[in-house]
Image (tube, helix red, strand yellow):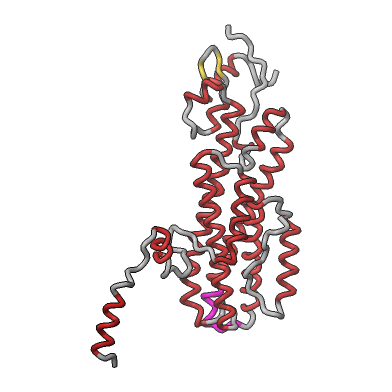
Amino acid sequence: MSDFQFGAHAIHTPDSEARFIERRDSVIDSVKPANVVEGILTEELLHASWEMQRVRDHSADANPAAEPRLNTAHTRASRNWHRSLKQLKRLQSARASHDCELYHLAEQQVASQCPLADLNKLPKPLVIDTPEVQ
Amino acid sequence: MATAAQVLANQANAQHATGPRTGQGKANSSRNATTHGFTTGVLKIDAEDRPYFDAVEKALIEQIQPKGALEMDALYEFRDAAWRLRQVRKITRQLFDEHGEDPFTNPESEAALRQLARYRAAAEMSLHRALNTLRDLQTIRLGRTIHLAKSENETIGPLASPNVFAFPVVEGIRMNRVARENFDEYHGIGKPS
């Protein structure tokens, strides 16, 4: 993940650049993306987070004519923030469950070829002792 | 104003300008009017961004390990949507650099920003939908490999939901949920003693 371009093309002024970098590092630290899919979604989360901050920054001294634009921007950023966070939670849960829930080596090998598979949607192993049908 | 001789010379020269001839040349000139590439099926990748695009694509394929045409399609949808979102940010940043004011508050950027918002909404929807589809396809693939016998893999449709795999086969009959519950109740399975 070291060569992933986090925060590329973000809008910040010389005044707000330090705050942006702080936020970028904080978001990355909160998510700790481990691969490129998580990286792409972390990028979305970061930009949504920064856009909401920009809206808050402008809200204090906004021209009334700009308010509808700011409201629309905030709604859009908020939606993308929630969606990206939800996807990241599902991705990291899937990654964790692959490590924890697959006990058999054969299952682990198959699961490593389906890294996005959601184990919660799979039936649980059937290990009951089925009695003889009378 | 051009003289009659110049007009004739221009017309004669124009006969030699017949446009691109090779397939590659025609493909190149077909993209001459492309500005941001959001409304076309072909991604616009600037030359300076090409190495990064290729690296991201390679990493995606290595990580997701798509198998089959459907997973590849979903992966390309995901890749394209992620790239379009990046392009939207790049163009928005250019607006900021041109006007020196945040596009959120600059009335001059309003029309462009509104158009970009539409492209962005479409790309966001595509990104999340493609990821959900990839997850579903890989869940089915994993479920089939773990829970189905080889003969069942050949007879049950490849996109069948993993939930159907939950039911045990008793005396050659795959039991549905109701039959399973009746079976368990009859044999006292799962009931407190």
Q: Nearer the viewer, residue A124 or B127?
A: B127
Q: Position of residue A120 (x, y in %)?
A: 63, 37
Q: Position of residue A114 (x, y in %)?
A: 62, 38
Q: Nearer the viewer, residue B11 or B136?
A: B11
> For the C terminus of chain B, which image quadrant?
top right
Number of dots carrying numbers = 0
The reply to whether residue B178 is visible in this rendering is no
Q: Residue at x 54, y 39 (%)?
A: B137
Residue A29 position by quadrant: bottom right
Residue B105 position by quadrant: bottom right
Q: Position of residue A23 (x, y in %)?
A: 72, 67
> In terms of secondary structure, what is the magenta stretch mainly?
helix
Q: Which region is colored magenta?
A: A62-70
Q: Nearer the viewer, residue A37 or B183?
A: A37
Q: Residue at x 51, y 82 (%)?
A: B107
A19 lies left or right of B170: right
Q: Residue at x 53, y 58 (%)?
A: B124
The reply to whether residue B51 is visible in this rendering is yes
Q: Nearer the viewer, residue A73 or A26?
A: A26
Does A5 appear in magenta? Answer: no
Residue A25 position by quadrant: bottom right
> For the N terminus of chain B, which image quadrant?
bottom left
B40 lies left or right of B80: left
Residue B150, compared with residue A29, is above or below; it is: above
B39 lies left or right of A50: left
Q: Position of residue A13 (x, y in %)?
A: 67, 79
Q: Residue furthest top?
A: A134
